[in-house]
Amino acid sequence: VFITSSGFSPRPAHQYSPPLYPSKPYPHILSTPVAPPMSPYNGQSQFSSMQQSTVYTPYSQTTQPYGLSTYGIKTEGGLTQTQSTLQSGLSYSPGFTTPQPGQTAYSPYQMPGNQAHIYHIAQWISILVLKDPLPYTLYPSTPIKELEDRTCRGGGAKTRGRGRKNNPSPPPDSDLERVFVWDLDETIIVFHSLLTGSYAQKYGKDAPMAVTLGLRMEEMIFNLADTHLFFNDLEECDQVHIDDVSSDDNGQDLSTYSFATDGFHAAATSASLCLATGVRGGVDWMRKLAFRYRRVKELYCTYKNNVGGLLGPAKREAWLQLRAEVEALTDSWLTTALKSLSIISSRSNCVNVLVTTTQLIPALAKVLLYSLGSAFPIENIYSATKIGKESCFERVMQRFGRKVVYVVIGDGVEEEQAAAKHNMPFWRISSHSDLLALHQALEFEYL
């Protein structure tokens, strides 16, 4: 059959030009017919190839843009996030992509049968999207490393302030990408709020029992600090970091050294109180001080995964019983926090750092008794008792450099303000749901 030119109507070329879809967010959904019906061939019924099917309702974007609400993610403070915000805030996740046209929206944090347990990752997003974008460009404004940044880091100069020569904890400069800076009390562990009764009041627990457990744990902490970590000698000469007086250590073998008879305590009590820097005596006294901190470091490294061996059989059983009772009262708060710490520790490009307002020696005792030693090498523990958290954050940045991303996790105003000062993302911990959301974000590699 030969078809003459009069029986065929070619489609004008301009109908397939780009202006055909001037502003449609979904070009595969056609809201109007894009071409008039074709003229029928001789002997054939009319066929409209480009008419829109009546089965599909045209997409009408009458509310907010296609973005956060599609995922069932709710922001704090009613802040509405747009698609561009979501993409910039979550672009670090290798497994995350925005939905392609035609995909079905889903809610990845929906717990079965309980609407109240939707994990609000937008807590993270809303924190990242600062009220006023900070012009300070030395620090990243989001907790992510863009792909371009990652690829460019292979050949650069060494980061500044990499820490002390005996510090094995940070990965090589080219590998380290994120530093998670943790608070201790009421973030990883529940301790102070047990003593004050505020935890029992907030969660409807037995207040006398909570206070009793707090007092028992406090006694165990200071008993360990006094008995094994020289807290009686070092309380008035607290340091920010375990290696702060290491320059006064001459490397003497301490295997047969007698700390009880070296005269340090007598010299300390007769001298004036320690200065803010922790320096008080002469060269000999400072060397003895350095010996004690070196011994503390050795004990920590030896028993960080086996504090029961340091306590002895009797105290070990009491410690295990106390830990179990505290976990039961606090609904496994510590166990939940340990899951997040473990995920971070397992990554070769991430590191956990602890910054606490507790004095250094009691802080080390807490870390040991709460089984946090595997998550925090002793070089990664800082006490902000003397200098405050903002100054501690500065020290952490000097050590790990300014090319990595710092994420601050805590419950207090001080660490939140210090994080804002240094343009660090802050993840607030105020309840179990915050810990669960953090764990989910880490597990799905949003962080």
Image: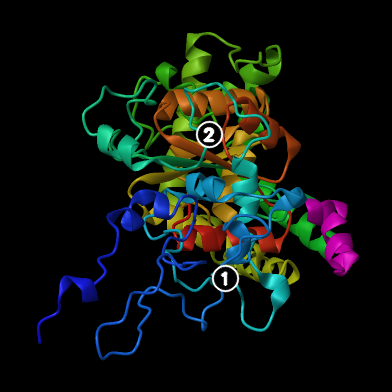
Q: Residues within 10 Å of mark 2 (few under 14, many from 20)?
A: many
Q: Residue at x 40, y 41 (%)?
A: 145
Q: Quadrant of residue 254?
A: top left
* Left or right position of 118 against 249: right
Front: mark 1 or 2: 1
Q: Residue at x 38, y 79 (%)?
A: 48
Q: Quadrant of residue 336?
A: bottom right
Instruction: Check disc 1 and report its element: helix, strand or loop.
Output: loop
Front residue of this view, candidates 191 and 101: 101
* Left or right position of 4 against 180: left
**What is the chief secondary structure element of the magenta stretch?**
helix
- Based on the picture, tell me whether residue 338 belongs to the magenta stretch: no
Mark identifier at residue 107 = 1
Callout 1 amino acid: Ser
Q: Residue at x 42, y 32 (%)?
A: 257
Instruction: Check disc 2 and report its element: helix, strand or loop.
Output: loop
* Left or right position of 148 against 145: left
Front residue of this view, candidates 229 and 218: 218
Give the mark nearest the N terminus, 1 or 2.
1
Q: Specify the segment rendered in magenta.
A: 193-209
Whether residue 315 is visible: no
Callout 2 amino acid: Ser
Residue pushed farthest left?
2
Residue 57, above or below 345? below
Residue 197 in the image, given as x and y percentages of width and height: 87, 56
Residue 189 in the image, given as x and y percentages of width and height: 66, 55
Q: Which residue is mark 2?
A: 141
Q: Quadrant of the N terminus?
A: bottom left
Total of numbered circles in the picture? 2
Residue 32 in the image, given as x and y percentages of width and height: 50, 66
